[in-house]
Amino acid sequence: MTPGKPLFGIEEEIFITHPERPSLQSLYYLAKLLWKNPGYYYSHSDSNFARGEDVKQAIMGGVELSTGCHHDVDQLVADLAQRRAEFADVCEDALLVPLGHLIDLRAPTLTCGMHIHVGNLRDHEKGYNNLAHFLPLLAVMTANAPLVSGKYFGKSFRMAQSYALGPLRLDPWYRFQDLIFARRLGTIEIRVLDPVWDLNRIRTLVNCIKAVVECRHSFPLDRERYNELRKIFTVHGYCEELRPLYLELRDLVDVPEEIFIDTPADQVRQSYEKDGLVPTYSALDNAYRNNVFKAREIPTVKQQPARAAVGFASYYIVRLPYKLQKVWREWSR
């Protein structure tokens, strides 16, 4: 494909809870999805697990679905909506929770993100630099992990402390930082973003990304400035230090300032403080399925070890060769 017209793809991670915690039954739902469409979901789904001391809180982490590659933003969002609908269809008796970090835990390896890939650029270095320049704003738009151990942390505990993220390094190929060159796909991968339920917000986000990589101007890469700002925006969100970036971004694309001020994290915090843990997860589930952030009746779910065993055998083991190859390609030069 001739470089020039950007391609976009989304990898979205969410938690499956029953109703407060994820469990290995998540593999069962992934298995159901895989065998409904193995040609697609063998390479467009994945599972994650806790590491180290976090295993004491929960073994199972989030699950991942990914879209195809699209030039058109509306087609990309429609693809994501289809992935969500297909997954919701096989998860009738569980809660689907798009959240960067579970409310009542403190577990830096039990986090979920939304990774956006940008490819097919004429100048990948310029695209990377421009994205890094505006990354504090792009991140704030999705901030959605406000609580740790049931207490308010700030806009995103995940952005601040997840093991899989971090300040920008001199080596843009190093995987565990906020923005990278992805070895496996040959794209620029925006890793810092939290998962959010609102498809319109995601559409606005990708339109901003599109404007940033397509603009003629080359913005300077200032890693030190970004790394200082991430200490601020991960806790406080949109603030005085970010407004100059907003004014620059507004010159490139028509985006309202309010979308950076009012974050998903604010809705989650208000819901939890008013209604508690499970109703908030129910509201997130409803928002993921129907784009309506409102609690509804919670399905009654019993832990079924047999489901976990079926999922492990018919999903995790089946995909293990692909997963090992994927890990090798992500880390090898």
Image (cartoon, helix red, strand yellow):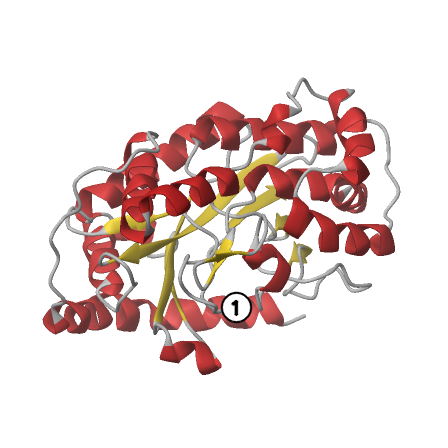
CA neighbours of label 1 inside 10 A, class few (<14), some (14 to 19), many (20+): many
Residue shown at the point (78%, 56%) measured from the top left? 227
Q: Is residue 167 visible?
A: yes
Q: Is residue 215 visible?
A: no
Q: Provide residue 134's location: percent of width, then percent of height.
A: 75, 39
Asked whether, in this view, residue 230 is left or right of residue 197, the answer is: right
Quadrant including the N terminus: top right
Q: Hey, which residue is sitting farthest top in the picture?
A: 254
Depth order, front residue of 276/113: 276
Residue shown at the point (46%, 82%) measured from the top left? 53
Q: Provide residue 180's location: percent of width, then percent of height.
A: 68, 56
Q: Provide residue 237's location: percent of width, then percent of height.
A: 65, 42
Depth order, front residue of 27/184: 27
Asked whether, in this view, residue 329 is left or right of residue 120, the answer is: left
Asked if 228 appears above or below 239 in the picture, the reply is below
Depth order, front residue of 88/224: 224
Q: Quadrant of residue 19?
A: bottom left
* Dot 1: element: loop
Q: Provide residue 276's location: percent of width, then percent of height.
A: 33, 49
Q: Quadrant of residue 110?
A: bottom left
Specify the amino acid type for callout 1.
Pro
Q: How many marks?
A: 1
Asked whether, in this view, residue 246 is left or right of residue 142, the answer is: right
Residue shown at the point (51%, 46%) measured from the top left? 144
Residue at which label 1 appears: 108
Quadrant including the C terminus: bottom right
Asked if 299 appears above or below 173 in the picture, the reply is above
Residue shown at the point (69%, 47%) measured from the top left? 233
Asked whether, in this view, residue 37 is left or right of residue 42, the answer is: left
